[in-house]
Amino acid sequence: MTLLKAEGITKSFRTGDIDTLVLKGVNLVLEPGEMVALSGPSGSGKSTLLNILGLLMQPSDGALSFMDKPMSGLTDKQLSAIRNTHYGFVFQFHHLLPDFTAMENVAFPAAAPAGGISAEIRDRAKMLLGRVDLTDRIDFAAMRLSGGQKQRVAIARALMNKPELVLADEPTGSLDRENSARVMALLREINHEDRTSFLISTHDPEIAKCCDRQINVVDGRIA
């Protein structure tokens, strides 16, 4: 089974009477258990590509399949269900709910569709916080956590629904070098132990070196 496959992906944006072509026929394949860096200069199109691969944006043309199933023609509700069940997301700015505790933030992806935090959801959220070395911060409001701690909560949240694929957009961009190394070591550990696949968008060559391989996006194409 191929986890993710993109064929001839294009994306253009219209401003007034002008169409700007951002992605120009991108092809890529991601296999189960891979940890891959997605690199490229600002404006290269990698963030747009990550949004399309994450089912957050529709391509203008081309085909995308996930777990060997085509994603074209699906409704927003169907795409949302796939994202929530099979994907995890980690962003440069963690986007935690500031008044929620660390546990509540981690539980949210499972609790929202379930209508609340069950004992099973609570136990998994606590287990994941232990996994990212935050057992002593379970009941802390997110606003009381340090930057590195918030990013580790965001990683635990991304794993809540046991995703096959985690997409990370500059996950260490707001962290210092020590915390960046800690976060990458954690992602690699999860990748090895759980066989969770990661696609990590980054400008940092040191982060890219931590991955199995690197995909470079230059001017809307895979270099």
Image: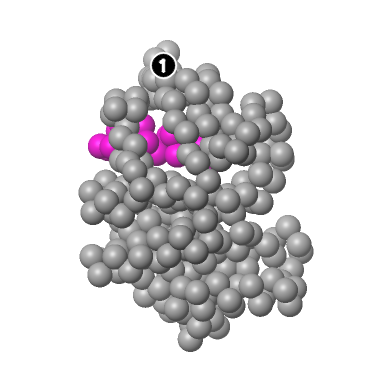
Look at the image and tell me in which quarter the N terminus lies.
top right
| Residue 6 lies in the magenta stretch | no
Seen in the picture, residue 204 relative to 131 is either above or below; the reply is: above
Q: Which amino acid does label 1 sit on?
A: Asp
Q: Which residue is drawn at 76% across and 62% down?
A: 114
Q: In x, y percent, where is residue 167?
A: 47, 48
Look at the image and tell me in which quarter the C terminus lies.
top left
Which picture quadrant has residue 42?
top left
Q: Residue at x 50, y 23 (%)?
A: 7
Seen in the picture, residue 186 relative to 170 is either above or below; the reply is: below
Near-viewer residue (91 or 158): 158
Mark 1 highlights which residue?
A: 19
Which picture quadrant has residue 108?
bottom right
Span colored in magenta: 40-55
Q: Residue at x 56, y 29 (%)?
A: 64
Q: In x, y percent, where is residue 22?
A: 38, 24
Q: In x, y percent, where is residue 50?
A: 45, 39
**Residue 96 visible in the displayed image:** no
